[in-house]
Amino acid sequence: MPIVWREQMSVGIKSIDEDHQRLIMLVNQFADVIRQGGGLSGGNEGAIRTLLGRLQAYTNEHFAREERIQDQANYPGLKENRSHHAALITELNRKIERYAAGEKAEKKLTGEELSAFLNSWLVNHIIKVDLKMKSHKFTGVW
């Protein structure tokens, strides 16, 4: 089931909300390819690898932007957020590596399992970590 952006997911900072919407789009695109039977062996290997590469790159870009904004605003949750981001990036990279290894992986990860993970980590991160920013006063142009 695709992730649907809702106003309740907004942290109230335009650039971060736009990042979240783009990440949702990328996660949903991956899920669509997998649902259509386009796994790594389904003839879409290049497109899937490109999409996952974009997801990894944009996740890193988003986390860096979010931490920079939090740092500039003296956000008290910055340390926790940095730690959470580092753990998410590590887990994301490991899952994508397992998926990309396919049958060669020690513990194979299917496209459906990776898609479920992506949905879960993105939504949980927004709801459990990022929404805490709403209670902090962020000033300036973000």
Image (cartoon, rainbow, N blue to C red):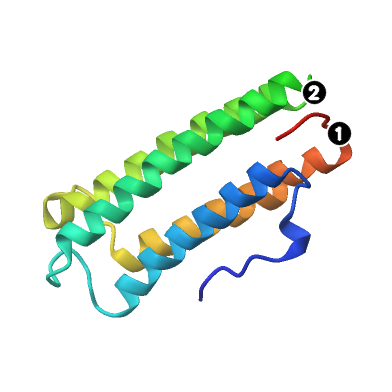
> Which residue occupies the extreme front position in the image?
141
Label 2 element class: loop
Mark 2 vs mark 1, CA separation in Å: 8 Å
Label 1 element class: loop
The C terminus, quarter of image: top right
Mark 1 residue crowding within 10 angstroms, few (<14) / some (14–19) / many (20+): some
Is residue 24 shown left or right of residue 11?
left
The residue shown at (71%, 47%) is 128
**Mark 2 or mark 1: whose residue is earlier in sequence:** 2
Q: Which mark is residue 136?
A: 1
The amino acid type, in three-letter code, at marker 1 is His
How far from the left and from the top, in percent, is residue 77?
75, 27
Q: Quadrant of residue 57?
A: top left
> Which residue occupies the extreme bottom position in the image?
36
Kindly report which numbered mark, 2 or 1, lies closer to the viewer in this rendering: 1
How far from the left and from the top, in percent, is residue 100?
21, 51
The residue shown at (31%, 55%) is 51
The residue shown at (52%, 54%) is 22
Q: Which residue is mark 2?
A: 76
87 up-or-down from 52: above or below: above
The residue shown at (61%, 51%) is 18
Is residue 29 shown left or right of residue 15?
left
How far from the left and from the top, in percent, is residue 37?
24, 78
How far from the left and from the top, in percent, is residue 109?
28, 57
Q: Which mark is residue 110?
A: none
The amino acid type, in three-letter code, at marker 2 is Pro
